[in-house]
Image: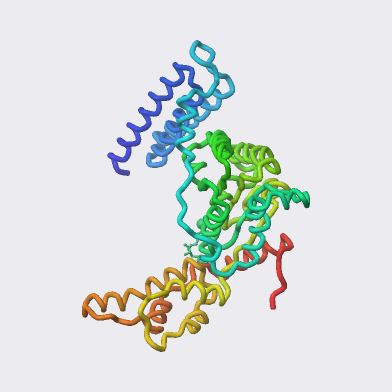
Amino acid sequence: MKEENIDVLSDTFELYMKKGKEAKDKGNVALAKRNFLLAGETMMKMAKISQGKLKEVRMERARRLVEISDNLQKHPISSGGKKNEKTDADEDDDLKKWQAAEIPNISFDDVAGLEDVKKAITLKMINPVKYPDKYKLYNKKTGGGVLLYGPPGTGKTMIAKAIANEVKAKFYAVKGSDIVSKWVGDSEKNINSLFAEANKQERAIIFIDEMDSLIGKRGVDTHNDKRVNEFLQQIDGFSGKNPNLLLLGATNRPWDIDSAAMRSGRFSQKIYLPLPDAAARKFMLEKNMKNVPVEKDFNIDKIVEKTEGYSGADIEELCDRAKDEPLLEAIKTDKVVLVSNKNFDSVLETFPPSVTEKEVKQFEAYNEELGLVKKKK
Ligand SMILES: Nc1ncnc2c1ncn2[C@@H]1O[C@H](COP(=O)(O)OP(=O)(O)OP(=O)(O)O)[C@@H](O)[C@H]1O
Ligand SMILES: [Mg+2]
């Protein structure tokens, strides 16, 4: 493997070690722990691109660093300095990590189809915020989380943003894999600080994408199990108490999520986002072709027919690609070249749906298991 790669990693490793030792000497356990873990993670990367005996030695060293950092947590540094307390600097660090994201102005009206989904979300997440008195009158339960699941490109992230807009909330978007990979073993603390930060806001949505990588089924990997436990505690801590903190998860592998997270009061509401039906595809095609110069006999319905099985994201890409040829021609000739059905057909020839039938079947089987299936017509 490339030498310079090892050099960079080695420098990074030394830096984390240095910072870790400094923090340990000052008695800042949290910071020391984090740096030793990062050093361990870097050492693991070095091991991965090494061979033979060196690989083994590096793996072992990486493992030891994780151990050292674990022990730091269990036995706070006793010699001088502060005890196992968070310092202001630490607190600052956490705040920086969790800043509300800017969200584009997307509303429910922009989301094609998914009427059941919109209705369920309105009832569970939007109305409690808009009409708290009515919810009180009926003693209706609020809080808890909603899990959006479905194949890729079906609008899960889009809907999450639309909800944030509807209820005018701060939007904390987190990817499960980000939390996990950046802070191996430190993720519990980050989950904790995420909830703490969101709780400070008048109204906030925590949106966790790729939930499956954050809270997988327990019993396989101890890091995962710790994360799941922390996560469950956090959900239980706010569930039912703060209707202004909404928790939204998204995944395209719902069957991989720990089942305890799905119980009542947690992610008890699971909403399936299927591939778009004909009406939804038409809506999307029209939106994507709005104000675009098209041939007189341009027929959107024909494209609707040919795109069964295509996701929302696919449709967007299809439209974009179909515009390429006329656009290039227009540049070449400096004339307006109209988009035609033929342009779509030629793209479709080499552009199969990104979601396979097998994957769709997997979702259908999962829905059946949950008892959520609607009878097919
Ligand atoms: N129902 C929909 N209505 C309108 N546009 C949609 C819809 N579904 C998907 N799209 C389009 O596809 C793009 C991708 O959708 P989005 O990112 O929300 O998918 P996702 O379900 O979160 O996918 P992933 O599982 O890969 O994260 C959106 O930016 C949007 O343009
Ligand atoms: Mg998404």
Q: At which x and y percent is residue 165?
A: 53, 54
Residue 170 on image: x %, y %: 52, 46
| Residue at (38% x, 31% y) in the render | 13
The C terminus lies in quadrant: bottom right
Q: Position of residue 357 (x, y in %)?
A: 57, 70
Above or below: residue 38 compared with residue 313: above
The answer to whether 106 is drawn above or below residue 321 in the figure is: above
Q: Residue at x 29, y 75 (%)?
A: 327
Q: State the residue lying farthest toward the top.
A: 80
Please name the colour scheme applied to the rendered image: rainbow
Outermost residue toward the front in this view: 133
Q: Position of residue 355 (x, y in %)?
A: 52, 67
Between 189 and 10, the one nearer to me in the picture: 189
**Residue 118: quadrant of the picture:** bottom right
Q: Residue at x 49, y 23 (%)?
A: 87
Using the rendered image of the protein, determine whether residue 57 is visible from the camera's viewpoint: no
Quadrant (top left, top right, bottom left, bottom right) of the N terminus: top left
Q: Nearer the viewer, residue 116 or 232?
A: 116
289 on left or right of 213:
left
